[in-house]
Amino acid sequence: MKTEHARNAARSWLPALAIIVGYATFRAANSSIYLSRFAQSPESFIFMTEPAFNITSALATVICAIAVVALCAMGRLKEFSMPVIPAVVILFCGMGATALEGMAPLPADIILAFSVIAFAVGSIMLKMAWIELFAHEAPRQAIIQIACAGIASAVLQYGLSILGALRTIALTVVFLALSAALLIAVRNGMKKKEPRILEHWHPHRNNAPWKNAVGEISDALLALCVLEAVIGLINSFMLAASMTFAGAAGIPSAAMAIAAALFCFAALISRHLPAASAMFRVAFPVVAAMVVFVPFASEGYTRLFSTVLLVGYDFVALLLLYQVAYASHKFNVSSYALMALFSGCTKLCLLAALVIGGVFGGRESAAGSSTVSFLVLACAVIYILAIAAVLLSRDRRKRTALKDAAREDASAPARAAESENAEASGTHDDARCDAAAVSPGEDGAAKQQPDEGETVAASEEESLETTCRLLAEKHGLTGRETEILGYLAQGRTNTRIAEDLFISPSTVRGHIRHIYTKLDVHDRQELIDLFH
């Protein structure tokens, strides 16, 4: 029995370990390829040295993202259909073109364009393949895997940064190959499980799952887009105006390590991820105050400002990565499309910022003075941050309640008929709204029933989900309250709900109070009776 238990434990941990190692090596290799462009420039600021490289990369990423969204909308990209080996080959070709730059008979601009496009295409393909694995994991497992992979990739990136050029290239190739092998192995294992039934986008339907999924990531996406635009504006302006500083090459790796450590602390120790809106409200006054003094301060201050800005950016990027996986898992929508939305929107903001900052900074470089113009740029940055802070501080609960009320008024007749059918079918038993799996040991007897029993259980679970959804729509529950309602109906404790959703127990208690008030119940037994 002990041997069998050990084998089962190994089977459950090995895929998780493979995901952590594989994603960490991919991130380290991907960053190494990106940062290798720095070796061709003596100075840099924040994370860019060549505006042409970054503009071309951002443009290629936006085009790829649009293509992926279009393919997903047409139903052409199925589950586990993102090619892995071709993506790795594309990255290798881009690395080879970069290594041969200056020696090949082709013009340098053509080689640069090819290497940049290869990097953008191969990178986004592998990112989408990895995010799909996280979307198939339970939210608790996904967040732990992302956190551990983030800190491991930061360590690997530091190791690559202190090695010589040849060793770095060799290890980058090894990391990419190892990452691809682990990705394929884990994906093949997931293919053997029961496939998810994804909700496809239909232009003439309500598409509620897609709207809910986009709403789930909207705050973090807005925060990341704003930070990407701010970094692009400042970076491109200072490069065009020759306002560079020494010691910038190590900032990206250091910032990523700090952000990964903070994310690990939030996910594994405090067990509570901050909301993007709350984090942005903290970062806004800090960045706004620091950016004004950049043209007057020392290089040490500029390095500190750059690090603070990148730490905030990298942390929000990790947070959004998890939210993309969570939204795909919760609403059964394509992770490819959500990841394409993530990459496309952020790179579009970066592209616009690079062009504007480069043009503005180039004019001041020709005029010979850039201090006053940088202050003007700082005012623009503060204005952008302020607008984003206002948007992120709006009460999402009120907006959701208004949408639920409008939906209730519009679909009252259909809901009434559906409610009668649900009552006639005799809905009972506890169920989660998002159809999450029952934990081991809870329904052990049911698992031993014949296939007919499993079919009946599945039918009951489906009808319970319908009842849960009807209650949420009828009483105007928010998305989070609807989710917690399912946990309550299943009999989960406040502590378990907080652990599964990565929110604090006090937040859970607050949501439960709102649920009781809206449903006009006084305890859990009265709430559970609503499902009988």
Image: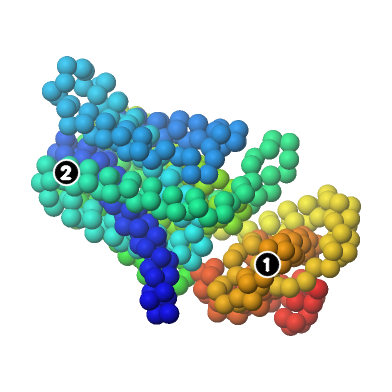
Disc 1 marks which amino acid? Answer: Pro
Describe residue 80's horizontal placement relative to residue 253 as left or right.
right
Tag 2 secondary structure: helix
Q: Which residue is mark 1?
A: 450
Disc 2 marks which amino acid? Answer: Ala
Residue at the spot x=74%, y=73% of the render? Answer: 429
Q: Give the percent coordinates (x, y) of residue 261.
A: 32, 65
Q: Give the percent coordinates (x, y) of residue 151.
A: 31, 61
The residue nearer to you, when weighing 7 against 438, is: 7
| Residue 526 picture quarter | bottom right
Residue at the spot x=76%, y=76% of the render? Answer: 527
- Given this view, does label 2 or label 1 mark the residue nearer the observer? 1
Residue 207 vertical placement versus 428 (above, below):
above
Crowd around label 1: few <14 · some 14–19 · many ≥20 (10 Å): few
Q: Give the percent coordinates (x, y) of residue 42.
A: 14, 39
Crowd around label 2: few <14 · some 14–19 · many ≥20 (10 Å): few
| Gap between marks 2 and 1 measured at Cα | 55 Å
Quadrant position of the C terminus in the picture: bottom right
Q: Give the percent coordinates (x, y) of residue 49.
A: 24, 38
The residue nearer to you, when weighing 135 against 28, is: 135
Describe residue 232's horizontal placement relative to residue 516 as left or right.
left
Residue at the spot x=89%, y=52% of the render? Answer: 413
Q: Which residue is mark 2?
A: 170
Tag 1 secondary structure: loop
Can residue 446 be seen by looking at this rendering? yes
